[in-house]
Structures are given as structure tokens and as C-alpha cells.
């Protein structure tokens, strides 16, 4: 029988930023100690428990995100934006639909910067929604398409014709459907 360890950590548990080797090493050691503790606890009831697989790389889900022109929030459920480049849901529950504004992909302070995936500009509450693979695929396609459109004109990401970008994304099969909007 396979047993997956899902230990809820106390609120006082140290967090790790993952931006230096000491922090990464400390997180790996702390994680291994938690796994060992759980295994020893399980072995009290069943002596035939052996770990088959433990994480081999640090599991940093949230480390850095862009401070973009716009910050998407969980309260933006079903809110359509004029510069929407795709849609995503909340992988944790049925129902919510989020339109992702292009402005979440471009930097507010650094000219000609675009990002995709789990580091787009969102609030803490929306971060857990947008870090999932489907959202990363939507934002990655939009960022790549924007780069392709702008490459021949030598323009910055903030200069893009949003309607042209949206039309190209729709041609590529991206769903940008306003019918789910509350506005």
C-alpha cells in the first residue's frame, strides 16, 4: 500500500524564501526531518513501512512574483478586462473563472519586461490559483505571442496593440469569452 504524507504544518513553522543556498539547504533538512518523523509515527502501527520516494528537489511553490501594471485578485472572479489574454479557473474548487489581463504579465517599473506562469502580477490570494499549470500555459502562450508580434516592430511590451494580440490568441485557439463575465 502506498501512503502519501500530507502533514499540515503549524502556523508557527518557519518559511523559506529560497533565494540563497543556506535557505534551500535548511529547507531540505527540515523537510527530511518531517518525513522521518512521519515515517517513524507510521511504523508504530505497521513495521513494514519503507519510503519509496521522497522529494529530490526543493519544493518552492511561491518565491517571487512580478509587480505588474495590474494585480489580479481572487475578488476578480468573472470580471472581464479589456486586455484579457485568456481564462483560467480555480483548481481548488468548481465555479470561479478568472480573465487574465495582459497587464498582469508586463512590468510596472521595468520597461520591456514580460513574464508568465506562477510569477505574474497577482495578489497573495490569487497566487495559489494562478500558479497551476493551466494558467502557466495560458500566460506563457500570451507572452510568447506578444513577443512574436512585437519582435518585428522593435516595440516594448507596453506598446502592444491588445486587440491584435487577442485576435491572434483566438486564432491559436485561446478562449477569451466574455459571456462568463459579471459586468
Image (spheres, rainbow, N blue to C red):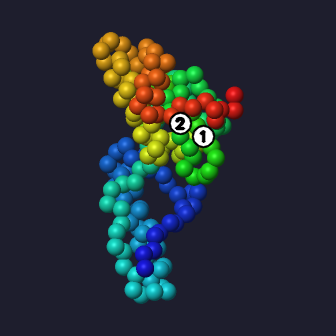
Residue farthest toward the right in the current orientation of the protein: 183
Marks 1 & 2, CB-CB < 8 Å contact: yes
**Residue visible at 64% across and 47% down in the picture:** 95
Q: Quadrant of residue 178?
A: top right
Residue 55 location, x and y as percent? 36, 62
Which residue lies under the disc numbered 2?
87
Query: In the rendering, which numbered label is found on residue 76?
Result: none
Using the image, determine if residue 8 lies above or below residue 150. Answer: below
Secondary structure found at label 1: strand
Which residue lies under the disc numbered 1?
97
Q: Is residue 55 left or right of residue 105?
A: left
Residue 115 location, x and y as percent? 40, 31
Q: Quadrant of the C terminus?
A: top right
Toward the viewer: 35 or 61?
61
Residue 50 location, x and y as percent? 36, 79
Toward the viewer: 17 or 94?
94
**Residue visible at 53% across and 46% down in the picture:** 128
Secondary structure found at label 2: strand
Q: Residues within 10 Å of mark 2 (few under 14, many from 20)?
A: many
Q: CA distance from mark 1 to mark 2?
A: 7 Å
- Of the image marks 1 and 2, the number of the one nearer the N terminus: 2
Amino acid at each position: 500500500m502506498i501512503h502519501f504524507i500530507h502533514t499540515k504544518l503549524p502556523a508557527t513553522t518557519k518559511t523559506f524564501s529560497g533565494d540563497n543556498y543556506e535557505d534551500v539547504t535548511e529547507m531540505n533538512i527540515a523537510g527530511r526531518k518531517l518525513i522521518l518523523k512521519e515515517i517513524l509515527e507510521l511504523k508504530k502501527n505497521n513495521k513494514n513501512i519503507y519510503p519509496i520516494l521522497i522529494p529530490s528537489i526543493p519544493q518552492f511553490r511561491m518565491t517571487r512574483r512580478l509587480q505588474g501594471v495590474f494585480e489580479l485578485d481572487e475578488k476578480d472572479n468573472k470580471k472581464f478586462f479589456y486586455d484579457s489574454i485568456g481564462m483560467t479557473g480555480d483548481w481548488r474548487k468548481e465555479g470561479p473563472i478568472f480573465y487574465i489581463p495582459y497587464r498582469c504579465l508586463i512590468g510596472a517599473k521595468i520597461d520591456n519586461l514580460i513574464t508568465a506562469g506562477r510569477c505574474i502580477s497577482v495578489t497573495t490570494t490569487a497566487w495559489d490559483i494562478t500558479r497551476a499549470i493551466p494558467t502557466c500555459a495560458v500566460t506563457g502562450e500570451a507572452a510568447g505571442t506578444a513577443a512574436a508580434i512585437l519582435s518585428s516592430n522593435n516595440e516594448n511590451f507596453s506598446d502592444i496593440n491588445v486587440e491584435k494580440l487577442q485576435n491572434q490568441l483566438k486564432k491559436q485557439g485561446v478562449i477569451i469569452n466574455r459571456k462568463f463575465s459579471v459586468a
